Image (spheres, grey):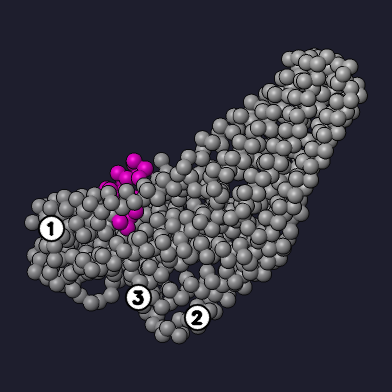
Amino acid sequence: MVNSPILQMFARSPFKPMQEHIVKAQESAAELIPFFEAVMKNDWNTAAACQQRIAELENEADDLKRDIRQRLPASIFLPVPRTDLLDLLRMQDKIANRAKDIAGLMLGRQMQIPQPIQAELLGLLQTTLMAIEQAVLALRELDELLTAGFRGHEVDIVERLITGLDDLEHKADEHERELRSSLFAVERDLYPIDVMFLYQVIQWVGDLANRAQQVGNRLQLLLAR
Amino acid sequence: MDIIAQYGNIMVIMACVFGFFMAWGVGANDVANAMGTSVGSRALTLKQAIVIAILFEFAGAYLAGGAVTETIRKGIIEPSMLSANPELLVYGMMASLLAAGVWLLIATHFGWPVSTTHSIVGAIVGFAAVGISVDAVHWSKVGSIVASWVVSPVTAGILAFFLFRSVQKLILDTENPFANAKRYVPYYIFLVGFIIAMVTFTKGLKHIGLHLSWLQSAGISVVIGLLTMGLGMFMQRNIKIDVDADREYHFTSVEKVFGVLMMFTACAMAFAHGSNDVANAVGPLAAIVGIVHNSGEVAQKAAMPAWILLLGGAGIVAGLVMYGHKVIATVGQNITELTPSRGFAATLAAASTVVVASGTGLPISTTHTLVGAVLGVGLARGLAALNLKVVGTIFVSWIVTLPAGAILSILFFFMFKGIFS
């Protein structure tokens, strides 16, 4: 048995697992692209397989989240406020959750996407995914931020990435607005309950971008001191 | 008087065995705390760390271990109280060695972060206060030793905080950390060489017949600092920016430059550790040898023989070679969060604090000082996650170790008294 206070002092770092967690969340959201394509082709077998993968990735993200929380009892001293870090983790996790919601709802109702809005919906999804990827890029700087002690030049780099993330979220907002009006233009020809749920899906896809932006905001809070 | 004449040689041999065993324990266990940070930061391989530990623990013990040994030997107890029956001091010192050794075995078995220094000081105070008389203890000296146990981790923490903040300001937080690392790291290396040399020359070395004035010491220390700086610059000359490695983690090349610095601070740490902790083992031995060789004269002024420090140094190295390397490997493998840029700040702060304490003759805990230094780096937002529970455990170990060492040494004291008289 090694009796070394020095050894006992070093707790496992939560920062690497934080990065792994957001990558998992991003991967689960990225599965939505093949999922949407399958839905638009009415290929429900492929769609079900995609939904399965999304659910698995979301599960893995959940496990990581639990693991990170367990290793952060109040007696752990971190270079950033512990509550802010846990808040960031919660936001990251919400991305995966929403991806799973979207896939679950669309598969469950075997939703039909009307031809006129298909391209636009894919466009919104792509912009949203770009925002999530930008959040991953910002989080990837976390170990460099740690080395720099959350100060100086590294902070500027991350601030720039977060500004980029904000821009992408605005773009996603615009897409969402345009998509709503496109759907509004054709909604009279569709079955009303389907339309309700289409609006819901549009909102949820937009949510993905919002949550990516929230991740950026929480990261910014970690830096502000 | 008769007792010493009769059993003097047996007593010295027993004391040598106990002292060697204590030094062995220091080498087997404590060195790992001093060297673990260097191995953990991947700046040194295990083999390099062991070679450095062997050389510098020994050098520290021999060259700068004198002052603390003197404190343990005759700083804690008032010798004039003992001139009537000096054999009591011999029993007491043997009891202290045995008590501290036994207590460390118990503590290691249960995994408590107990300090060798605290055990031996507790043991000496214990036998002196109970076995001889409460007035036999230099309470003011004991007070300042105990105070230094609080002051030393705090000082190391503050030093580490500012060292690491300076590294952030000068190197890590700049646009071009690599170029700045190459520019400023040699100055830190100078600091390492200078501090160690300065303390050694001003406070140690008298026992090997070297008497230098303060100014001479300062001059030689500057030269030694410059020499280490030159060696460091030579070692870092071939470090180039590794673009591929930096893409994944931007500070890879920068940390390589700090790796060179870390090698020097590892040497300093081993030196500091040897200079302070050897006394725990050989201080009581020196007291016993002093009495026996002067046939019962307690308050003699003659300097202690150099072979005692050599024996202590040899004991540390033996413990290190036989067992300590395994502990270093375990500690090193598990401290993965410590990169050279932080490891150096913590180690240099701790080493400087310890070596100054060694020069002043204060027996402190190297491990606790290093814990304070690591916390200092943590407060500068330099470390990923620190377990603050350790600080609590250390406090508890302070409170438990002093009485435990005292009680054990009182028991052994009366045991020896019964055996010999």
Judge if badges 2 and 1 mark residues of a common chain. yes
Q: Position of residue A132 (x, y in %)?
A: 74, 38
Assess disc 2: are there few (<14), some (14-19) or many (≥20) residues with their C-alpha within 10 Å of its C-alpha.
Answer: some
- Chain for numbered disc 2: B
Residue at the spot 56% in from the left edge and 63% down from the top edge: B165
Magenta region: which residues?
A: B100-118
Depth check, front residue: B31 or A201: A201
User: Picture quarter containing residue A131?
Assistant: top right
- Depth check, mark 1 against mark 3: the one in front is 1
Q: Which element carries disc 2, helix, strand or loop?
A: helix
Amino acid type assigned to the residue bearing label 1 in the image? Gly
Q: Earlier in the sequence, mark 1 or mark 3?
A: 1
Residue at image mark 3: B207
Depth check, front residue: A217 or B333: A217
Is residue B46 found left or right of A147 in the rendered image? left
- Chain for numbered disc 3: B
Q: Are marks 2 and 1 in contact (CB under 8 Å)?
A: no
Assess disc 3: are there few (<14), some (14-19) or many (≥20) residues with their C-alpha within 10 Å of its C-alpha.
Answer: some
Residue at the spot 61% in from the left edge and 62% down from the top edge: B168
Q: Is residue A163 above or below residue A86?
A: below
Residue at image mark 2: B220
| Circle on res. B131 | 1
Is residue A62 found left or right of B290 in the rendered image? right
**In what quadrant of the picture does the N terminus of chain A appear?**
top left
